[in-house]
Image (tube, rainbow, N blue to C red):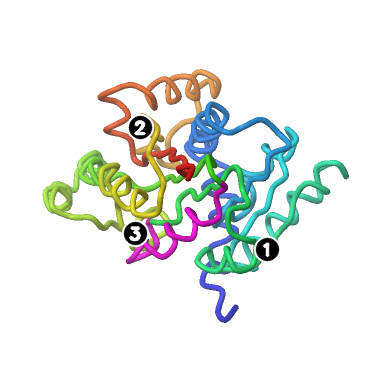
Amino acid sequence: MGDDTWAPLADRFVDGHYGSLRGRVRTHVIDAHLRWHLPPPPAEVVDVGGGGGHQALPLARDGYEVTILDPSSAMLARAAEALDRESEEVRRRVSLVEAAGEQAQALLGAGRFAGVLCHGVLMYLDDPEPLVASLAGLACEGGVISIAAKNAANLAVRPALAGDWKAALASFQADRQVNGLGLDTRADTVEGLTRLLGRYGVETVAWYGVRLFTDGWTPERPALDDDDDVLAVELEASRRDPYRQMSRLFHLIGRRRTE
């Protein structure tokens, strides 16, 4: 697979991001959206760029047959560690595949999956179209395609809340921003991603916001919040305007058209 560019970041991403409350907000809100749209288990689901398995393993616990595909051996190693802590029954439902998402059809088969997940991956690609085409090809007819992307409409908010007014002003015209890991990322719009998916036979059926009120939280912020209350508020905001439009990420649900 060549150099694993995620290896130096794997622990920070898995433990630092997903281990924080704002990371749990992301997982909780996206999981709730998914459950409203996925067919019931034991449907087959593939998580492209699934990393440490935070989004996929809860599905496996509930009976879904899950494939986690990721180009990073370090990220998959963290998924394997998490999988080792699961029951044998759950472990049997999960496959780990090291590959880029653009190669997924050749490795896993076209038109196979009832659910195709890709969360927080498009933002690292200068050209998302090859991966979007692969996601569409993995889905069976009527299959659900779930994509979480950075919200281009929100880019000015984080620097403004930090008091960096020059960066905030520039962000109104930008589609790129350095994220919390120090990586340059690209943002999308719901309308643009809807058009792109439409080229490959996928119709957008719903979209939601992901992480609004907790996005600006820093490690120095006192941990005085009730997690359940935070999750409930973020979930409610995710499906209401104008809150979903202002969220850091958006979660788009598409469905592969039937012939």
Please indicate, yes or no, whether residue 189 appears anywhere in the rendered image: yes
SS label for mark 3:
strand
**Residue 144 to residue 126: above or below:** above
CB atoms at circles 3 and 2 under 8 Å apart? Answer: no
- Residue at 45% over, 46% down: 147
* Rendered-image quadrant of the N terminus: bottom right
Residue closest to the eye, 38 or 24: 38
Q: What residue range appears in magenta?
A: 123-140
Q: Position of residue 201 (x, y in %)?
A: 41, 49
Q: Earlier in the sequence, mark 2 or mark 1?
A: 1
Q: Position of residue 248 (x, y in %)?
A: 34, 40
The amino acid on which the numbered mark 1 sits, given as a three-letter code, is Val
SS label for mark 1:
strand
Q: Earlier in the sequence, mark 1 or mark 3?
A: 1
Q: Give the quadrant of residue 174.
A: bottom left
Residue occupying the far front of the picture: 259
CB atoms at circles 1 and 3 under 8 Å apart? Answer: no
- Few, some or many residues within 10 Å of mark 2 (<14, 14–19, 20+): many
Q: Position of residue 170 (x, y in %)?
A: 13, 53
What residue is disc 1 on?
97
- Residue at 42% over, 57% down: 132
C-alpha gap between disc 3 and disc 2: 18 Å
The amino acid on which the numbered mark 3 sits, given as a three-letter code, is Thr
Q: Which mark is residue 185?
A: 3
Q: Earlier in the sequence, mark 3 or mark 2?
A: 3
C-alpha gap between disc 1 and disc 3: 25 Å
